[in-house]
Image (cartoon, rainbow, N blue to C red):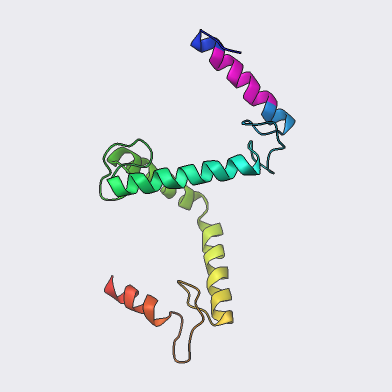
């Protein structure tokens, strides 16, 4: 249904999206949507591949992954880096106990299995907590 008025087209797309979401069908095609998503498995994979390629291209060109402006010492521009840091700080403050317990459980499991606490490789005899590779990286910091 071609619309000449952009606002009418936008409203039509919003209604279509809402109805597909409510019915549990893919918003791109009419296949059943994947559990907890608005797209089918095929379109989820396509979107993931597109996003990965786009992020990789931005990384290679030194652009922000959010807005394509020049990145400042990483993957974000100054504005998005600040927003990311603030978001992560809020998340960590909100979930500090959960994160501590989760990290401790992982650490305990790694120790019981005789694995490196950082990368999870099986430790060889004489190594304790970290493998030699992670230990070298740790002491270089």
Quarter occupied by residue 87: top left
Which residue occupies 48% across, 91% down?
Answer: 125
Q: Total number of numbered labels?
A: 0
Residue 132, horizontal then vertical, whole percent: 38, 82
Secondary structure mostly taken by the magenta-highlighted segment of the chain: helix
The one nearer the camera, 66 or 102, is 66
The one nearer the camera, 123 or 93, is 123
Magenta stretch holds residue 83: no
The residue at the far bottom in this view is 126
Residue 48, horizontal then vertical, whole percent: 52, 45
Which residue occupies 60% across, 16% down?
Answer: 12
Which residue occupies 27% across, 73% down?
Answer: 140
Quick check: 77 above or below 138?
above
Range covered by the magenta-colored residues: 9-19
Residue 61, horizontal then vertical, whole percent: 28, 45
Quarter of the image for the N terminus: give it.
Answer: top right
Quarter occupied by residue 135: bottom left
Quick check: 127 above or below 3?
below
Would residue 75 be seen by someone viewing this image from the given angle? no
Q: In this view, does 3 lie to the left or right of 69?
A: right
Residue 117, horizontal then vertical, whole percent: 48, 74
Which residue occupies 63% across, 25% down?
Answer: 17
Quick check: 80 above or below 4?
below
Would residue 135 be seen by someone viewing this image from the given angle? yes
Q: In this view, does 55 lie to the left or right of 11?
A: left
Q: Is residue 82 left or right of residue 88?
A: left
Quarter of the image for the C terminus: give it.
Answer: bottom left
């Amino acid at each position: 249904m071609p619309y000449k008025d952009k606002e009418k087209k936008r409203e039509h797309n919003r209604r279509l999206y809402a109805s597909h979401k409510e019915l549990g069908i893919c918003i791109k095609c009419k296949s059943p949507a994947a559990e907890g998503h608005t797209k089918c498995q095929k379109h989820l994979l396509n979107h993931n591949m597109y996003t990965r390629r786009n992020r990789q291209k931005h990384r290679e060109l030194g652009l922000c992954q959010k807005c394509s402006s020049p990145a400042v010492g990483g993957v974000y521009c100054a504005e998005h880096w600040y927003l990311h840091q603030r978001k992560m700080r809020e998340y960590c403050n909100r979930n500090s106990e959960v994160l501590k317990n989760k990290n401790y459980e992982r650490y305990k499991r790694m120790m019981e299995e005789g694995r490196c606490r950082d990368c999870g490789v099986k430790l060889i005899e004489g190594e304790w907590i970290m493998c030699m590779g992670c230990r070298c990286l740790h002491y270089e910091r």
